[in-house]
Image: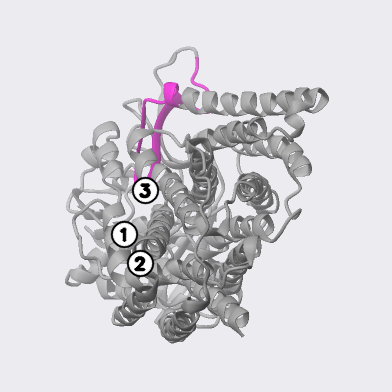
Amino acid sequence: MTKALWSSTIFLSAFLAFQVQPLIAKMILPDFGGAAGVWTTCLVFFQAALLLGYAYAYGLVRWIPSRFQSHVHAGVLALSVLALPLHTKDVLQGAEPSWRVLAALALGVGLPFLVLASTSPLLQAWYPRGAGAGVYRFYAVSNAGSLIALVTYPVLFEPYITVRHQAAVWSAGYVLAVGASAAAAFIREKSIAQSSAPEELTPPTRGTIAMWVALPACSTALLLAITHHLSQNLAAIPLLWIIPLSLYLLTFIIAFAGRGAYHRHFWMRLLAVALASLAYALDPRLGSPSLVILIPLYCAGLFVCCLVCHGELARLKPATQRLTSFYFAMSLGGTLGGILVALIAPRVFSGFIELPLALGTCAVLALVALRRDPESPFYKARWQAAWLVAVGVAVVINAGLLAVVYRQRVGSRVMVRNFYGVLRETEEAEKPAPSAATGNARRVRTLLNGPIQHGSQFLSEDRRRDPTTYYGRHSGVGLALRAAGETGPIRVGAIGLGVGTVAAYGRPGDFYTFYEINPLVIELARRDFSFLGDSAAEIQVIEGDARLKLESEPPQNFDVLIADAFSGDAIPVHLLTREAFALYSRHLQPQGVLALHISNTYLYLRPVVARATQDSGRMAVLVTTRANDAEGTFHSSWVLVSANREILSSDPLRAAAVPLPSFPEFRPWTDDFSNLLGILKWVPE
């Protein structure tokens, strides 16, 4: 009976602790423009809350008399229920985004999550004596609950249940977990008299404690860095957060499941292959491989590296009397790794180098673990030489990758970074190359967010006002602006600034308003590109998330509203929902045009836009154009939405536009529901 109660309580608490993570992250994403940095900051918060939960368990067991521990915990359980229901109030508006995310999470879910985090170490410490090392199997049960929560969220919860109902179900589950924890505390209270006095133990060495901290710090840094890399270049969606985190938890289950589950010889050999493979995948010269290659490669590499870290950690676990100290050191390491990636790296590094650094650290820690163990193959000459060669090759490859990042910085005019990602400016000769008569004067300046171009400008005087990249004169947005402007001056709104290319269409009497969430983008567009300054239109740039700004403004009566907000190659989900389209309609003239940029490497956005358009009662056409090196334009896809049939069939659009197909079976997205799993393009276009 006791074992069943302990197992079920630990399992349920872990399930709820990890189900709330994608749920509440999805709830706060719209407040921060759907940026990939939201999830890495969330992970830092949950790592820190896990640390506090483990610290609470450690302090309760270490410093509170045994007969009072159950009473104290019962009081904390009761207090935590008062924090329900879940909410995400932005209480630090105007502050740096990372601190706003942390504050919203602390108020919305902080105390309940701390209680859930403390359940596993506390109940393991309270388990009747005599179980020995078998108590650590409860840690595998805990991670199994966490893993099942993450795996089922995108399959059973996100596609079918709205966010509001998910929060209600989670709150009910939390009350059940509190009741189970209180029952366990009551049973433990009755069994205190039967417990034997704790035996004196030899304290762990400083080196061992250092490994308790360093190994989980490295694995957490790898988890966050790889997750950020995938989210930045695909989409900031729960699916791409859940897969790496699930694999991370699976490695804990394998490592702590029991003796022999982690086969050191096999996984150590595979580690060198994983390090080299991840270094290869990170090489920016590879372009955009398909998801069929990209996601498995990163996830397999993460799995191997984390399993080695956690397997070596499990080999160092102490006697159960020091269990809470061990878990506290582990959570401290995880928190430090998360802080390094999510909070320190964006402020210290101008490029994305934390992942190569974490890979190199993993190799070093593996060597240290082998060197500390006299029974390891490191002491056998044939294994020692082979391992040193393999790890040496991996380290060299990772050093080469750091050199690539360094060359990116050296080859860039500007390389800066903040919460929203890495921005880089480059210059190169025009394509096709200029003639001998013009020499090297004809050059192109480009802004990149990660590997994705967010705007380019010809620098020569005769071409610097030419719209380029996705905004050429024959693109959907170019044709829409031309059609709308046939009757006179127009008002234009643009969600997303880039380098301000759309301002090239501005004429005397026109008024253009740009909404941009990233202050660095605004600074670079004004300082290093001249589209805004050269435009004949009156220009206004508003800093902040476009949807939040539009919700707070009176109707702007735009003739054309351009939705073109990308972070890397990811488009914020909250800009594609039914409610977002209703907001766009409120700010458009009755006969105005909504121009949506849906060019995307990995997401098939046509059904999302088609259903939102259908629900808004408007018509939509699709304009697709091919790349043209001479004009500096790219392949682009734009959807133009309007209640005015005449403007969508006017001369500028008649030859280029085709009706947007309908997708009657596709469930429309709302602020409460979205499902990106169904629109992933596994092979990039």
Horizontal and vertical percent position of residue 154 = 57, 71
Q: What element carries label 2?
A: helix
Dot placed on the residue nearer the N-terminal end, 3 or 1: 1
Q: Distance between the residues labelled 3 and 2?
A: 15 Å
Disc 3 secondary structure class: loop
Task: Tell me the element at label 1.
Answer: helix
Q: Which residue is drawn at 70% across and 32% down?
A: 374
Q: Quadrant of residue 113?
A: bottom left
Q: In this view, does 463 lie above or below 60?
A: above
Which residue does the numbered mark 2 point to in the structure image? 28
First in sequence, mark 2 or 1: give its number: 2
Q: Residue reaching furthest right?
A: 382
Q: In which quarter of the image is residue 504?
A: top left
Magenta stretch: includes residue 424: yes
Q: From the viewer's perspective, is the residue at label 2 or at label 1 nearer?
A: 1
The reply to whether residue 545 is in sight is no
Identify residue for label 3. Answer: 420
Identify which amino acid the numbered label 3 is placed on: Tyr
User: Callout 2, which amino acid?
Assistant: Ile
Left or right, residue 465 beside residue 10? left
Residue 396: image location, x then y, percent: 63, 23
**For mark 2, does the 10 Å Cα neighbourhood hold few (<14), some (14 to 19), or many (20 or more) residues?**
many
**Which residue is at 38% across, 33% downward?**
350
Is 376 located above or below residue 37 in the figure? above
Quick one: quadrant of the N terminus? bottom right
* Residue 56 image point, x, y percent: 37, 63
Q: How far separated are the C-alphas under marks 2 and 1?
A: 8 Å
Please name the residue that numbered disc 1 is placed on: 101
| Cβ atoms under marks 2 and 1 closer than 8 Å | yes
Q: What stretch is highlighted in magenta?
A: 409-435
- How crowded pointer 3 is (Cα within 10 Å; few <14, some 14-19, many 20+) is rated as many
